[in-house]
C-alpha cells in the first residue's frame, strides 16, 4: 500500500532508531533529560524564541501556547478551517475557557481586513474581548497553503495596533520554510507563541514543541504536568527529533515535487499546491477513496466531496508516479 492519508504515518528510519537508542536520558519532570534540553534549546534558537517545551503532540503545544496568551472568558480569532478550531475537539474551550470567532479564506490565509473588523476591544461587561489571533502556516485543511510573508508582517502590525497577541500553529512550518526560502526565524517573527511538530513532514515518531518567552514556557511546563503530560526519559523521543532536524528538512522539497506530480495527474490546480498536500474535489469522496484503495493507494476523505493526498518521507518518486496513475484512473468516469 502507498499511504498518502497523512504525513504522520512515517516510521522511523534505521538511522533515526540508532540515534534514539544511543540517546542520553534522564527524568524530564526533574528537568534532567539532556537530550530533551538539547532539543528545546536547538528549536528555540532556530525560531528566535527564548525557550521551548517538548510536548507529546502538536495539539498539546497549541493548547499550552494559546492558554498562556488568553484568560478564560476571552476569545481567539482564527481561520474557519484552522486545526485549533476544527480538529482539537474543543480543547481550547473545554480546558482553557475561551471562545473562538473565525474568518474564512479558501487558502487559509490571514485576511487582515477581516481580522481588523473582527477584533473586539475590551467593552467591560458587554462583549467578549479578543485576546489573540491564531494563524496556521502551512494551513492543513486549505491544502498545505503557505502564508505570504508580508501578510504575517501585516498581522504583527495589526495585533500591536489592537493590543492583542499572535499564536502561530506551525505544525508544518518546515514545509513553508523549504517552499519559500524564508528562514525559520523570519517565519516566526509575527508570533508571540508558536507550535511546531516533528512528527509530520520531519518523520519523527512522536513530538512537538511549544515556543515562547521563558515565563510563558515556565507556565506551560506547569500546565503540561497538570494535564498529565509530564514525561520522564523522553530523550529517546527527543533524539528522533534532533535526528529529523539534521536530516529531514531540505528533503521536504522532494515531497513538494511529488505532490505537484500527483496534483497534475488528478487534474487538481497545480498552482494551489504550495507544499505536500493535494486536495482533490470529487462528486463522491468515499467512492474515490475506495477505488484508490483497490489500486493500492490510501488517500483520505476530508469531506463528502473532498479527498486529500499527502506526500511524505516514506513516499519515493516511484511511489508518487504509481499513486498518480492510480488516482487518475480512479477519477476516470
Ligand atoms: C496544522 C496542525 N496543527 C496541529 C496539529 C496537531 O498535531 P497532533 O496530531 O500532533 O496533535 C495538526 C495535525 O495534523 C495540524 O495539521
Image: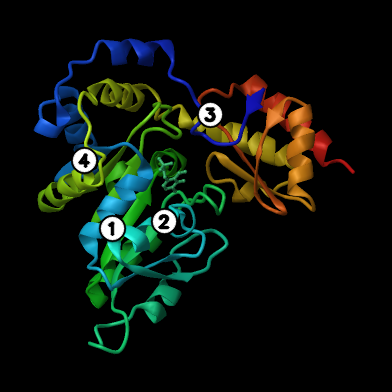
Question: Residue 244 location, x and y as percent?
Answer: 36, 25
Q: Secondary structure at mark 3?
A: helix
Residue 122 position, x and y percent, is: 24, 83
Residue with the mark numbered 3 = 254
Q: Quadrant of the N terminus?
A: top right
Q: Residue at x 20, y 27 (%)?
A: 232
Q: Kindly tell me whether mark 3's CB lies below 8 Å from ligand 1.
A: no
Q: Are marks 4 and 3 in contact (CB under 8 Å)?
A: no
Residue at 19% in and 23% down: 35
Q: Residue at x 38, y 12 (%)?
A: 15
Return the x and y of residue 234 as percentages of the image width and height. 24, 26
For label 1, the residue is 66
Q: Residues within 10 Å of mark 3 (few under 14, many from 20)?
A: some
Disc number at residue 53?
Answer: 4
Please tell me how crowded label 2 is: few (under 14), some (14-19), or many (20+) other residues with Cα within 10 Å. Answer: many
Earlier residue among tags 2 and 3: 2
Disc 4 to disc 2, how far (Cα)?
19 Å
Residue hosting label 2? 84
Amino acid at each position: 500500500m502507498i499511504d498518502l492519508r497523512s504525513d504522520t504515518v512515517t516510521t522511523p528510519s534505521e538511522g533515526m532508531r540508532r540515534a534514539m537508542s544511543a540517546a542520553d536520558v534522564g527524568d524530564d519532570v526533574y528537568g534532567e533529560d539532556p537530550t530533551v534540553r538539547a532539543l528545546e534549546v536547538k528549536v528555540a534558537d532556530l525560531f528566535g524564541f527564548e525557550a521551548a517545551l517538548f510536548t507529546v503532540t502538536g495539539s498539546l503545544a497549541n493548547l499550552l501556547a494559546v492558554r498562556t496568551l488568553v484568560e478564560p472568558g476571552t476569545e481567539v480569532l482564527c481561520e474557519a478551517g484552522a486545526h485549533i478550531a476544527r480538529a482539537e475537539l474543543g480543547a481550547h474551550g473545554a480546558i482553557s475557557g475561551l471562545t473562538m470567532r473565525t474568518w474564512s479564506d479558501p487558502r487559509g490565509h490571514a485576511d487582515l481586513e477581516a481580522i481588523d473588523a473582527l477584533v473586539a476591544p475590551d467593552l467591560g461587561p458587554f462583549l467578549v474581548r479578543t485576546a489573540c489571533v491564531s494563524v496556521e502556516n502551512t494551513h492543513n485543511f486549505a491544502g498545505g497553503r503557505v502564508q505570504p510573508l508580508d501578510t504575517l508582517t501585516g498581522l504583527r502590525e495589526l495585533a500591536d495596533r489592537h493590543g492583542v497577541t499572535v499564536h502561530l500553529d506551525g505544525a508544518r512550518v518546515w514545509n513553508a520554510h523549504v517552499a519559500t526560502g524564508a528562514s525559520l526565524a523570519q517565519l516566526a517573527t509575527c508570533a508571540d507563541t508558536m507550535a511546531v511538530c516533528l512528527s509530520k513532514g520531519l518523520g519523527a515518531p512522536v513530538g512537538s514543541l511549544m515556543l515562547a518567552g521563558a515565563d510563558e514556557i515556565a507556565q506551560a511546563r506547569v500546565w503540561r504536568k497538570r494535564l498529565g503530560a509530564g514525561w520522564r526519559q523522553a530523550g529517546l523521543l527527543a533524539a528522533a527529533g534532533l535526528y529529523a532536524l539534521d536530516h529531514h528538512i531540505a528533503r521536504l522539497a522532494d515531497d513538494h515535487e511529488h505532490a505537484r506530480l500527483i496534483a497534475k495527474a488528478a487534474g487538481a490546480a497545480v498552482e494551489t499546491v504550495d507544499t505536500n498536500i493535494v486536495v482533490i474535489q470529487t462528486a463522491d469522496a468515499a467512492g474515490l477513496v475506495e477505488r484508490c484503495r483497490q489500486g493500492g493507494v490510501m488517500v483520505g476523505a476530508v469531506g463528502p466531496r473532498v479527498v486529500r493526498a499527502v506526500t511524505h518521507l516514506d513516499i519515493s518518486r516511484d511511489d508518487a508516479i504509481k499513486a498518480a496513475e492510480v488516482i487518475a484512473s480512479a477519477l476516470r468516469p
